[in-house]
Image: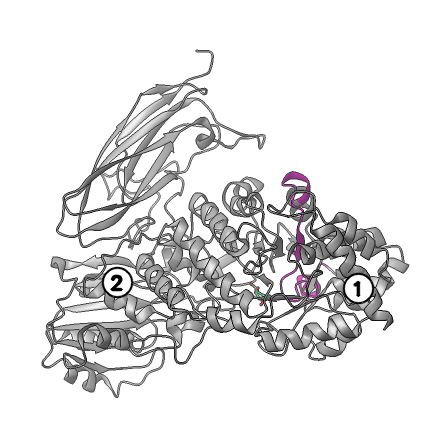
Amino acid sequence: MKKLKIFLLISVLGLLFSCTTQNTKLNTESPYRKQVDSILNLMTLDEKIGQTVLFTSGWDVTGPSMNDNYKEYIKQGKVGAVFNAFTTRYTKELQQIAVEETRLGIPLLFGYDVIHGHRTIFPIPLAESCSWDMKLIEKSARIAATEASAEGIHWTFAPMVDIARDPRWGRISEGAGEDTYLGSRIAKARVRGFQGDNLSKENTILACAKHFAAYGAAQAGRDYHTVDMSERELRSIYLPPFKAAVDEGVATFMTSFNELDGIPASANTFLLKDILRNEWGFKGFVVTDYTSINEMIPHGYAKDEKHAGELATNAGVDMDMQGSVYLNHLKLLIEEGKVSEEQINSAVRRILEMKFSLGLFDNPYRYIDPEREKETVLSKHHLETARKVARESMVLLKNENHLLPLSKEKKIALIGPLANDEASIIGNWSAAGDRKGAAVSVLEGFIKKIGEENIRYEKGCEIIGGDFSRFNKAVEVTRNSDVIVMVMGEHQNMSGEAASRTNLSLPGLQRDLIKSIKKTGKPIVLILMNGRPLTLTWEDQNVAAILETWFPGTMGGHAVADIIFGDDNPSGKLTTTFPRNVGQIPVYYNMKNTGRPIDPNKPDEKYKSKYLDVSNKPLYPFGYGLSYTSFTYDVNINDKVFRPNSEIIVSAKITNTGDYDGEEIAQLYIHDKVRSITPPLKELKGFKKISLKKGESKTITFSISTNDLRFYDQEMNYRYEPGEFELFVGGSSDLPFTHSFELMELNK
Ligand code: GLC
């Protein structure tokens, strides 16, 4: 009865205050401060420490599992949040323990890795980034939040905003590719999608910017490996997408596993206090990645868990994911004066403020609505949207003699280990995705599109492994076909976390299978399903058409069929460079020129920055992607000279000169020719996606101000410098500059 009284008191406090405050944008002072402090004053130290503890349920495991008696811990008030628990039934069971069986009845926060969809799985984030469509990316996250919140989830560990330039790193699949400008805009779109315009709405969930910071720069692309870089590189390339998430009001941050410049991220005061709190004014809470506090010991940075807990708390970590370090050591650290109770109060305040912002103190069961769960999950609208996003995410890499799109009358031999796959097609981090049943394979999509009488299917080989025994059967099914479509690539678990690879060729015998099929002399269309750039030099030289579909999600098979048979025209553009071979890595579009660049007129000249055995150019560059139609650009700039208080206007008249309606992603690249820190060869500074009917023209414009020309100078000031610039607008990053302009001093 006493518990009920206390909970009622908290609820009354919550109602009293919450009806007067609507928290629309986070990262401003919380409107719930009064009621949070009133609860904080009721809490014992043990109860406060309990709020800083995050445990996984037994439902899913996303790392080394450490505790399975989390229900007992909830009952004892030792847990503030649980992850990997979903469905209204299960979250209600756990929430009832917290609300009705603990002294204060403080509701739990339920978190989950809703990375690219919840039940309706969208293309992997790297795929979505290739759509360059911010509204579509936001809509994808919005649907993910709608479905997740219908199953009791309050918080997603997304967006992952790590810039990645190394395809050996499996987690490149979870982000937005190699470019900071594009990655920052995608970070904002995803935060908007997950959090909506008001967290008090029950179809919105807390977002989490991860992994802070520079996790994608792991040495040699080896997951969890060392990260060491200049502050200039960190601030220029890796931090802006996190800042963009803060500016968009992201509710939480997650620290990364890696060390940065010798200090593990979960103990890194420079990151967590100097930058995140003091420079950026972040007001949400910081959770560690899975047991990353404990991992300070193997990092050689803490002598034991208690020491690690002291370092993490004093660096600014608010919540310990799965590590039990805060649970087991914080009380003693406070008694020993190594951590102040005020620091715990600050952490608990931030956590409780988020629970208030979700309305959990008004009603801890408001996200538990079986009716909403039934009508929302895998709805027709969600599936149709997932199909559209999948189409927009696909990148046409090659289309010799306009082989694609295929006529629906063609006789198709459909071959390959991923042609009839319903598991890998939804990619890694597909969490609650409905692996069996809802996902549509390419075979199913083709049959639905053209009927089964014109399709003959044979798997041919496994994704990995050395079994040649089905090659002959595969060759046999090509006998009466007009064209061969091969669906090849990676298994869903060959990218994502703990999935670094040093050989990026098609795995197993897949290339051998293509070689066998190629002997038939019939044209081959290669459809790729993969979570990272692969090395495809042989394939590029030996098959007629290549479509990159990444892992296209629940509706992937239908989306592939839409593109292959011409019901939609591919428009995706690569957001990550495809190297010719692993030896080229890292290779990305905005590299530096060096002091000995290759002279294009003398490519064989020695003593230049190049390789003896391969070109410096990647196989497919950032920003590249073909269409079934073609586009021309007529670009003009309004002036050749401008001053800091004015701007350059770039206009591009784009014409669809081909035979299909289509979409074009026009990209603006700028090169600062001389400055006090060596400039990259070029930098993306704008993009626009437009639809053009065949024969149609449209003019788009970009404005360039001094804000677009800033960099970190020798004193780490973020500023522009007058001087010569050149630019171009086009459909890929590997095009020549066409215009130049000069930025004058203000007073000249
Ligand atoms: C994992 C991942 C992180 C994820 C977390 C919870 O180790 O690094 O991205 O959100 O644990 O599953």
Residue type at mark 1 is Leu
On screen, residue 336 versus residue 58, left or right, reads: right
Quadrant the N terminus occupies: bottom right
Decide whether the magenta segment is chiefly helix, strand or loop: loop
On screen, residue 480 versus residue 740, left or right, reads: left
Taking the image in four quarters, ligand 1 sits in the one at bottom right
**Where is mark 1, residue-wise?**
8
Where residue 248 sits: x, y (%)?
55, 45
Q: Upstream in the sequence, badge 2 or badge 1?
A: 1
Residue under the point 64% across and 54% down: 265
Residue under the point 13% across and 58% down: 402
Residue under the point 17% across and 42% down: 696
Tag 2: Cα neighbours inside 10 Å, few (<14), some, or many (≥20)?
Answer: many
Name the residue furthest bottom. Answer: 469
Which range is magenta? Answer: 277-301
**Where is mark 2, residue-wise?**
547
Instruction: Tell me if residue 560 comes above or below residue 651 in the rendering.
Output: below
Please identify the quarter of the rendering in which residue 60 is found.
bottom right
> Is 315 one of the magenta-colored residues?
no
